[in-house]
Amino acid sequence: MPYTVIKGTVRHNGKDYKVGEEVLSLEKEEAERLLELNVVEEKSKSKPKPKPAAAEEIHE
């Protein structure tokens, strides 16, 4: 199951994963530890990235 980094940086198998990146190859024990530390969450529970606000037009 894929996990999304939600806090800090996670180093796994020599690669750094930053907030918003997916970590695909976690073993069950590794995932449980990171979930307990609140640094990753299951992808299905990840919040979608907010869309940037549209620029307002100014009429004079």
Image (cartoon, rainbow, N blue to C red):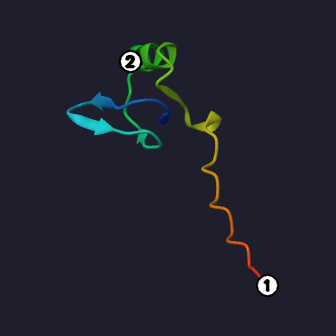
Q: Going by the image, does 27 lie left or right of 35?
A: left
Answer few, some or many: residues within 10 Å of disc 1's Cα (few below 14, many 20 plus, some between 14 and 19).
Answer: few
Residue 9: image location, x then y, percent: 35, 32
Q: Which of marks 1 and 2 is in front?
A: 1
Query: In the rendered image of this protein, does residue 37 appear above or below residue 41?
Result: above
Classify mark 1: helix, strand or loop. loop
Left or right relative to 16: residue 31: right
Which mark is drawn over residue 29?
none
Residue toward you, 14 or 20 = 20
Query: Which residue is at the far left?
Result: 14
Looking at the image, the residue that sits furthest to the bottom is 60
Q: Mark 2 points at which residue?
A: 30
Q: Which amino acid does label 1 sit on?
A: His
**For residue 45, side relative to residue 16 (left or right):** right
Q: How far apart are marks 1 and 2 (CA)?
A: 55 Å
On screen, 51 above or below 27?
below
Q: Which residue is drawn at 73% across and 73% down?
A: 56
Name the residue carrying label 1. Answer: 59
